[in-house]
Image: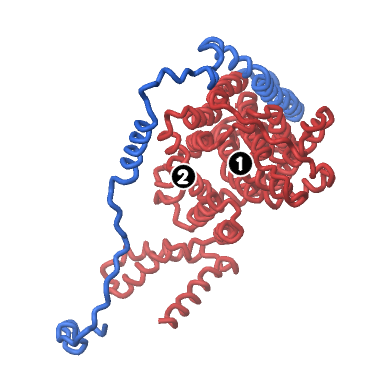
Amino acid sequence: MTHLFLYTDTLSEGYVILVTGLLIVFSGLLLLTVFFKFGLPILLYIYKIITKGPDKKVAEISSKVNKDFTGEIAAAISTAIYMYLDERHDKENAILTIKQARKLYSPWSSKIYGVYNNKL
Amino acid sequence: MKKIILIFGVLSLLIFIKPVLGFNNNSAKLSASAAISQDDNAFTQEGFISEAFNGIKQFYQYTGFANAESGNIIMILIGIIFIYLGIKFDYEPLLLIPIGAGVIIGNIPFVAGNQTGIYETGSVLNYLYFGVVKGIYPPLIFLGIGAMTDFSSLIANPKLMLLGAAAQIGVFATFLGALYLGFNLPEAGAIGIIGGADGPTAIFLSSKLANGINVLADGTTVKNLIGPIAIAAYSYMALVPVIQPPIMKLLTTKKERLIRMKPPRAVSQKEKMIFPIVALLLTTFISPSALPLLGMLFFGNLLKESGRTERLADTARTKLIDIVTILLGVTVGASTQADVFITKDSMLIFGLGAISFVIATMGGLLFAKFMNLFLKGDDKLNPLIGAAGVSAVPDSARVVHAEGLKADPHNYLLMHAMAPNVAGVIGSAIAAGIILSFLG
């Protein structure tokens, strides 16, 4: 990297950087703007020509090609997919509840005769 | 129990206040070291109690209470304020809370030389800080930003890219201001990038230019300004909702704020895929020094838009960027160790940073008005979106949206504002590259 302005005044170099820097930033983003405004549509158009002709319209697609594929088959396949995706697991209510049992007195849970004598 | 806590609190408060009140602990330190040396001589003669007492004394010399200086306490308070701002006002909490915690961590007083502090070679914090000093974290953050950002509004309306360029005037104006205030060229360049309103870019550039290692032509070493610059950039980014609205109101008329822009056209997936590649090629050929930032930014975006690498994009925009943000935030915060941070330069940088945000916002707004001179009818821009040209993604776009809604409750500017917003990121990275290639 060359330091052309090494021995000049710092401020004047600052101005040089200010002007050139702003110019470069602007021109860089301007270039991007121009490209995406004009270049990209052209690019996409060329791509379209290279890969294939114009897209087929719905009317052009012949219904005779899939003569064997009836509505029933479609319904069966879609049901199967639906079952596969959604009904694989039988769903259970995931909420667990513990029923409060009526407490009878037992020395095992006694507060008075406990082993650790802790006041629960 | 309460009483014990109260007594302990009062005691610790007293000890905390001691250095502030001017009872300097230097004399205490001297006497302690004297006592220790005496202790060596008369080791056998002294009893258990005095030995224990000396031990406690020595322990006290190692505690934060003995080493605290007013600077540390001020910085700890600032750290707490950062955390408070993040929690209470929701100003960029993802940044302010790690930074605030980092400020506290970095300003716990300690005895130097035990590999504790962030500036001591070999300490853990120093190793983490390495990613900041060498500019490793910023490109990783950019990768995540790229994987998050949707450039479609920019592709739909490419002329908004110029607003991102216009706001970069803040960078260069601050650069000039820093030169006037007597900073040398590399330092001024690093300070200027605060106007880019982009934390990672600011850290990247300052780690290259003002890192305290580079030597200038006249033999002086540049100052280490990474800490102040990063803190200034991040804190002003957090304050975008406070700084920008008054300037917007000042520079636009009510009529201009009511302008409705036509909705952006739908962008095809092909265009979205081509954008990162072409933008990468064009921008980095212009400014190769910004390659780490722009390369990662567009790479991340390609991961997102290619449609085949959703897993990678997902990691980049969630886990990876989170990890790096945590490390970056806490180490940048900790780098504000009081004896390095509280200087005249830091204050100047904070002043310049505020001015640079104002200039950048004004640049964007005025350029939008300037562009309106050439645009007709439907194509006219709402000048408010110019303010989003300072990057600060996505806060400034949100501010624009909010201001637009204030003028007209049915004018939704967010999508339009995102375009100059992301263009601002690209613009400030290019600007950083230019400054780096001029001064690096």
Percent across and percent down for residue B71 are 58, 58
Type of amino acid under label 2: Asp
Give the class, few, some or many, for how many residues have Cα within 10 Å of label 2's Cα (few <14, many ≥20).
some
Please identify the residue farthest to the bottom as the structure is shown.
A112
Residue at the image point whose x is 58% and y is 41% from the top: B199
Residue of label 2: B322
Q: Is residue B357 left or right of residue B235?
A: right
Residue of label 1: B393
A35 vs B394: above or below: above
B70 vs B263: above or below: below
Q: Nearer the viewer, residue B256 or B358?
A: B256
Q: Colour in which chain B is shown?
A: red
Please identify the residue farthest to the top as the structure is shown.
A50
Percent across and percent down for residue A81 are 34, 37
Give the class, few, some or many, for how many residues have Cα within 10 Å of label 1's Cα (few <14, many ≥20).
many
Pointer 2 and pointer 1 on the same chain: yes
- Quarter of the image containing the C terminus of chain B? top right
Q: Colour in which chain A is shown?
A: blue
Element assignment for label 2: helix
Residue at the image point whose x is 28% and y is 48% from the top: A89
Along the polypeptide, which appears first: circle 2 or circle 1? 2
- Report if residue B264 is visible in the image: yes
**Circle number at residue B192:** none
Residue at the image point whose x is 79% and y is 44% from the top: B257
